Image: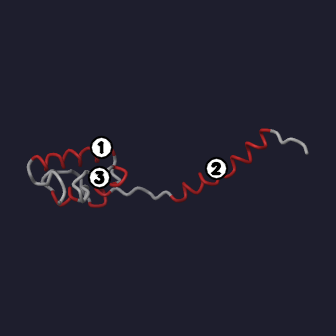
Amino acid sequence: MAKRSKIVKNEQRRKPVERYAERRTELKKPRRNQLKALGVTEVDYKDVHLLRTFISERGKIRSRRITGLTPQQQRQVAAAIKNAREMALLPVVGPA
């Protein structure tokens, strides 16, 4: 039996990785921007109903990965939630 070259072995190892990379791009969902969908142009701390959509059941601010917001919008929402908590419009912790 003749030895296979390292180049051939590496090419064979690379094929499954390429297949998974293609599959990953197919499965990725396009991001949806909730604020844009709702038609919100400015985030206000007094809009408690809107801010509750970005808070988990335990009272934590949802991450950008889950909300689908842009970094700037996520910072605005987080600041508005913190202001609303300070003004006692939102609970600091979720329901017990």
6 relative position to 14: left or right: right
Determine which residue is flagged by label 3: 62
Label 1 Cα crowd, 10 Å radius (few <14 / some 14-19 / many 20+): few
Image location (x, y in percent) of residue 29: 46, 59
Helix, strand or loop at mark 1: helix
Residue 37 image point, x, y percent? 31, 60
**Total number of numbered labels?**
3
Q: Is residue 74 left or right of residue 19?
A: left
| Depth check, front residue: 5 or 53 | 5
* Label 3: few (<14), some (14–19) or many (≥20) C-alpha neighbours in 10 Å: some
Q: CA distance from mark 1 to mark 3?
A: 15 Å
Q: Is 73 left or right of 48, judged from the image as shown? A: right
The answer to whether the residues at label 1 and label 3 have Cβ atoms under 8 Å apart is no
| Disc 1 target residue | 72
N-terminal label among 1 and 3: 3
Foreground pick, 44 / 22 = 22
Q: Which residue appears at 24% of the width and 45% of the height? A: 76
Residue that carries the numbered disc 2 in the rendered image:
17
- Amino acid at the residue labelled 2: Val
Between 32 and 56, which is closer to the camera in this rendering?
56
Relative depth, front residue between 79 and 35: 79
Residue 70 location in percent, x, y? 34, 48
